[in-house]
Image: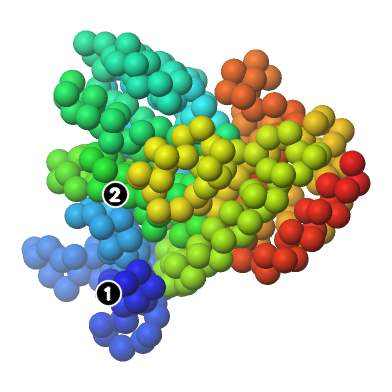
Amino acid sequence: MNINTRLLHDYPVVDPHTGAASIPKYQTSTFNQECVFDGQEYTYTRFKNPTVHALDEGLKMLADAKYALSFASGMAAISTSLMLLEKGDHIILPIEVYGGTYQFTCQILTHYGIEVSYIDMADLQNVERAIKDNTRMIYIETPSNPLLKITDIKCVVNIAQHHDILTIADNTFMTTLYQNPLHLGVDISVESLTKFINGHSDVTGGFIATNNEDIYNRLCLLQKNFGGILGVEEAWLVLRGMKTMGIRMERSVKNAQAIAEFLDCHPNVQKVYYPGLVSHRDFEIHQGQASSGGAVLSFELKSKKAVDKVTKALQIPIIAVSLGGVESIVSYPCTMSHACLSPEERLSQGVTDNLLRLSCGIEDTEDLLQDFDQALRQL
């Protein structure tokens, strides 16, 4: 089966008890136990819930993984996976890692005796140089947020396997429709359900996928005890949203490619960051591990004043935090995704005050291009 058929049929989508074409919301915290001496599959929703379980099965299908776990947010998935580390361990991350991940590793993990290193992961020699005797994990994020830098996943995995180091990849920007870290040898893949998988800007969630049973069991223990479970209502909404993910993403990627090419030639735009452009410095690496440029791009204007004018002039995209909705979303990383960083930390990652990020929705391409054209003409 191809992906759009699989998104509709290749996991539990029909309620086995009633035949309902939508898995019901099993909105309960606890379940009646017919015999106190015999175990049963469902006892308490923090441990397992039928609606959430159906979603986890769908996420297994999506990631082509043996195991998948949904979480209350993308950061819940990321932080839980990072808690596989123990006191005295060392982790390597890209310098331009997502702001929430940076804050968690920098301000929380270090209090538990875990060493953290941030490097330019585009240079593989930096990865080799950063490895220590106590390095236990390498964290990959490609394309990066918000500058869409590319990391060669296979090369990093080869380095990590040579040193017996665990690898984790944040795959939120590409989704497994266009890039599958597990197929490229990564041990754990994390994604935000909030973004493209749900796709309607009305849910927060995240998930982890892996093919390693031991890792999965450890993650289950952490999730059960940290309590970062996805709610039943949210699980049902993601199940609904995931059915149209394929056709939504197809249109969003088409829009991103068209807008990136338009902005790349515009005199009022200084620079465009999009791995679907041949001019992107790592275009070939990205093409070797992904099947599209994705639906997110960033671009620099000439000044902070220009950012103010353009964002006020745009009529179609909403100006907001987050990405991956059916509507196009323009974000200002300085005060949104990377607001938790100091100005110095933002600059070290290349996040300047004239940078905007665009998550393309499913609007008509011509309308989006006309809107960006009229907004840029205000400059």
- Which sits earlier in the primary sequence, circle 1 or circle 2? 1
Q: Nearer the viewer, residue 158 or 195?
A: 158
| Residue 144 image position (x, y, % from top left) | 50, 36
Kind of residue sitting beneath label 2: Ala
Asked whether residue 336 appears in the rendered view, the answer is: no
Residue identifier under label 2: 209
| Residue 165 image position (x, y, % from top left) | 22, 25
Q: Nearer the viewer, residue 31 or 357?
A: 357
| Residue 170 image position (x, y, % from top left) | 40, 40
Which residue is painted at 80% across and 31% down in the image? 302
Please rate how many residues cluster around mark 1, counting C-alpha atoms within 10 Å: few if below 14, some from 14 to 19, many from 20.
few
Kind of residue sitting beneath label 1: Met
Which residue is painted at 53% across and 43% down in the image? 278
Check the picture and name the quadrant holding the N terminus. bottom left
Q: Nearer the viewer, residue 307 or 100?
A: 307
Coloring scheme used? rainbow
> For this view, does 235 lie left or right of residue 321?
left
Residue 80 picture quarter = top left
> For this view, does 326 lie left or right of residue 122?
right
Residue furthest to the right in view is 378
> For this view, does 121 lie left or right of residue 159?
right
Residue identifier under label 1: 1
Which residue is painted at 68% across and 35% down in the image? 271
Residue furthest to the bottom in view is 19
Q: Which mark, by number, is residue 167?
A: none
| Residue 83 image position (x, y, % from top left) | 32, 31
| Badge 2 element | strand
Q: Are marks 1 and 2 in contact (CB under 8 Å)?
A: no
Between marks 1 and 2, how big is the CA–CA gap?
21 Å
